[in-house]
Image (spheres, rainbow, N blue to C red):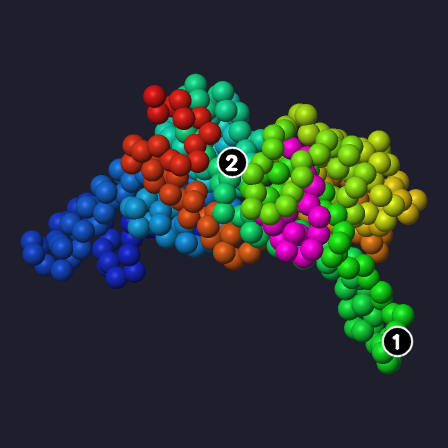
């Protein structure tokens, strides 16, 4: 069931408890008996950490080295809700993904729980009020992944605009015979306009790389941000009207749901590209399909989808998008570099260690539990 990474029995310890005959004092069996019971006593007082999916080893090693018992759910599919709730009874710390709802029911099922660390850059799976009422600290990973996501945005933008996937397929299928001057003419990005919706850490990094490519950078955000490269803040409609590429980096808020719909897509330049690797619900998918089908948009790059919980998707969801050659679809891998995921692993581990040591973690969502 679990990949238990700490156990009270060691491979070298050969002792089977016998309650009817004690071993002779100072014998090897007697020493093994003492060690066995000492380890069992220590084990009873260890903090237990549940990790709901397999994550990079760096963070798990930190937790083990801190003396915690670590259990990892290592099956291919996430826990069912019932399995998750059953697993919480003796857990002191929890490393969760957005597949686990940390609500009042989960908090009630975990009487020993002190901290939940979300292995994501957002936390819309948290009931902050319920956790705070119980004194459970909630943390997340808001930093350290902007480089990975920005590289994904720029890399896929160039991949789509230069028709690299189609050209690769052309060669693999044996159609390439000779160089042809008119084959796979893509669109260069120098001199084009990058429009960024949401100018936080990720959005600013996207703008920095786009600027290095010779693109003009426009952004829409609630406030003006200071950056070291030329970037102009514009109202949404104005930014959309000038953008050749729209890159969306929005938080999971009710106000950002379907923020890019039919009206907004119609404002955009003909042949422009939409990139969304933040929140699937930010883009109205049916309107996106219509504008792609009509040729109004030149393409789309989607790392997230309107049906965000894929377990709840219907069999025909995304079918039309999947059949469009000018659409790149990936399974939420924008932050998936070894470096970024290792950073996320060590960050959630450090948050767990801080809370269980009586310290306030750096990325705490409800700091009032430490007051």
Left or right: 351 as drawn, with respect to 240: left
Q: Secondary structure at mark 2?
A: helix
Residue 369's x, y, as percent?
38, 23
**Mark 2 = which residue?**
84
Q: Is residue 42 visible?
A: yes
**Mark 1 = which residue?**
180
Q: Secondary structure at mark 1?
A: loop
Q: Is 258 in front, or is 306?
A: 258
From the viewer's perspective, is residue 179 above or below residue 94? Answer: below
Q: Is residue 113 visible?
A: no
* Residue 213 in magenta stretch: yes
Q: Quadrant of the C terminus?
A: top left
Residue ID at (26%, 62%): 12
Residue ID at (38%, 43%): 350
Q: How many marks?
A: 2
Magenta range is 205-221
**Label 1: few (<14), some or many (≥20) within 10 Å?**
few
Q: Is 94 in front, or is 350?
A: 350
Residue 361's x, y, as percent?
38, 35
Extreme residue in the bottom direction: 178
Cα–Cα gap, marks 1 and 2: 58 Å
Extreme residue in the right direction: 294
Residue 28's x, y, as percent?
13, 60
Residue ID at (38%, 30%): 114
Q: Is 221 in front, or is 44?
A: 221
From the viewer's perspective, is residue 253 above or below residue 301? Answer: above
**Label 2: few (<14), some or many (≥20) within 10 Å?**
some
Which label belongs to residue 194? none
Residue 119's x, y, as percent?
50, 42
From the viewer's perspective, is residue 39 above or below residue 159? Answer: above
- The disc, 1 or 2, on the residue closer to the chain's N-terminal end is 2
């Amino acid at each position: 069931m679990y990949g238990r990474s700490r156990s009270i029995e060691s491979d070298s310890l050969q002792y089977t408890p016998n309650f009817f005959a004690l071993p002779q004092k100072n014998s090897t069996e007697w020493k093994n008996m003492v060690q066995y019971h000492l380890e069992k006593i220590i084990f009873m007082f260890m903090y237990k950490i549940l990790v709901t999916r397999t994550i990079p080893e760096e963070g798990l090693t930190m937790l083990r080295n801190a003396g915690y018992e670590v259990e990892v759910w290592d099956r291919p599919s996430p826990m069912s809700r019932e399995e998750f709730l059953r697993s919480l009874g003796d857990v002191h710390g929890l490393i969760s993904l957005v597949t686990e709802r940390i609500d009042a029911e989960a908090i009630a099922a975990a009487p020993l729980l002190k901290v939940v660390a979300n292995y994501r850059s957002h936390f819309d799976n948290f009931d902050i009020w319920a956790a705070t009422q119980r004194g459970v600290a909630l943390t997340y990973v808001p930093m350290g992944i902007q480089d990975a996501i920005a590289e994904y945005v720029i890399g896929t933008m160039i991949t789509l605009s230069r028709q690299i996937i189609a050209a690769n397929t052309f060669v693999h299928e044996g159609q390439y015979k000779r160089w042809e001057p008119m084959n796979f003419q893509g669109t260069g990005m120098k001199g084009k306009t990058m429009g960024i919706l949401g100018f936080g850490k990720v959005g600013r990094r996207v703008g920095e790389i786009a600027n290095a490519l010779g693109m003009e950078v426009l952004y829409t955000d609630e406030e003006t941000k200071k950056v070291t490269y030329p970037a102009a803040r514009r109202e949404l409609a104005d930014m959309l009207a000038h953008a050749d590429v729209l890159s969306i980096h929005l938080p999971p808020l009710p106000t950002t749901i379907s923020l890019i719909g039919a009206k907004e897509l119609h404002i955009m330049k003909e042949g422009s590209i939409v990139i969304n690797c933040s929140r699937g619900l930010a883009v109205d998918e049916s309107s996106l399909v219509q504008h792609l089908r009509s040729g109004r948009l030149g393409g789309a790059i989607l790392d997230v989808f309107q049906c965000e919980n894929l377990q709840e998707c219907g069999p025909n969801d995304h079918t039309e998008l999947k059949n469009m050659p000018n659409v790149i679809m990936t399974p939420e891998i924008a932050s998936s570099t070894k470096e970024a995921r290792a950073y996320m692993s060590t960050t959630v581990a450090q948050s767990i260690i801080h809370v269980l040591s009586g310290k306030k973690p750096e990325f705490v969502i409800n700091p009032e539990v430490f007051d």
